[in-house]
Image (cartoon, helix red, strand yellow):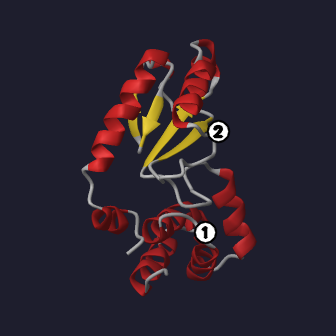
Amino acid sequence: MISEQAKQRMRNLASRYPAARSAVMPALYIAQQEEGYITQEALQAVAEAIGVTVDDVESVATFYTMYYQQPPGRKVIKVCTSISCYLRNCDALVKHFEQRLGIKRGETTADGNYTLMTAECLASCGTAPVLQVNDEFVENVTPEMVGTLIDDGTKRIQHIPERVYEIVVGQA
């Protein structure tokens, strides 16, 4: 549920822009912080707060990969697939992650620990291939590093109490 405080933050954002619709992206980010992902209620709250249609908000929310359309895993892995990363074999990284996690890109593991995504550009071409784990950059990634990233992430996840996770992603 989107809190009244979050809606007020969205309205305040919209008032800072010459055109309120310019606040769609930061308002979606606020909604995602509240819900953990972009729900139908989040789309409506953003639309109402900044005075645009739900369709306008949804078109932005579904275009950008930073807005989750379903509950993400505790660790979201985004592998860059832009030309620089492609030339440095990002496809092999995606395949390694898929095999190791037992999911395809765009999916979340059954235990809810990992979501695997691809991103068009993570703006780190000089250190390709690059990926992000929960928005933290990992550069010059090799296929051999995939196992280490997953093993290290799993250890960290096991040490996070479930209640803390729920608060962080707004599930509480």
Q: Residues within 10 Å of mark 1 (few under 14, many from 20)?
A: few
Asked if the residue under mark 1 is in contact with the one under mark 2, i.e. CB atoms within 8 Å, the reply is no
Frontmost residue, 14 versus 58 = 58
| Disc number placed over residue 36 in the picture, else none | none
Q: Position of residue 130 (x, y in %)?
A: 48, 25
Q: Position of residue 35 (x, y in %)?
A: 48, 70
Q: Is residue 142 visible?
A: no
Q: Position of residue 139 (x, y in %)?
A: 41, 23
Q: Is residue 163 left or right of residue 88?
A: left
Q: Is residue 170 above or below residue 118?
A: below
Q: Is residue 39 above or below residue 138?
A: below
Q: Secondary structure at mark 2?
A: loop
Residue position marked by numbered label 1 in the rendering = 19
Q: Residues within 10 Å of mark 2 (few under 14, many from 20)?
A: some
**How many callouts does the rendering have?**
2
Q: Secondary structure at mark 1?
A: loop
Residue position marked by numbered label 2 in the rendering = 104
Task: Please tell me which residue is depicted at 53% across the width and 47% down the height of the picture.
Answer: 109
Type of residue at label 2? Lys
Could you say which quadrant of the image residue 83 lies in? top right
Frontmost residue, 145 versus 23 = 145
Frontmost residue, 1 versus 57 = 1
Q: Residue furthest bottom?
A: 4
Q: Is residue 64 visible?
A: yes
Q: Is residue 104 above or below residue 47?
A: above
Type of residue at label 1? Ala
In this rendering, the label closer to the viewer, 2 or 1: 2
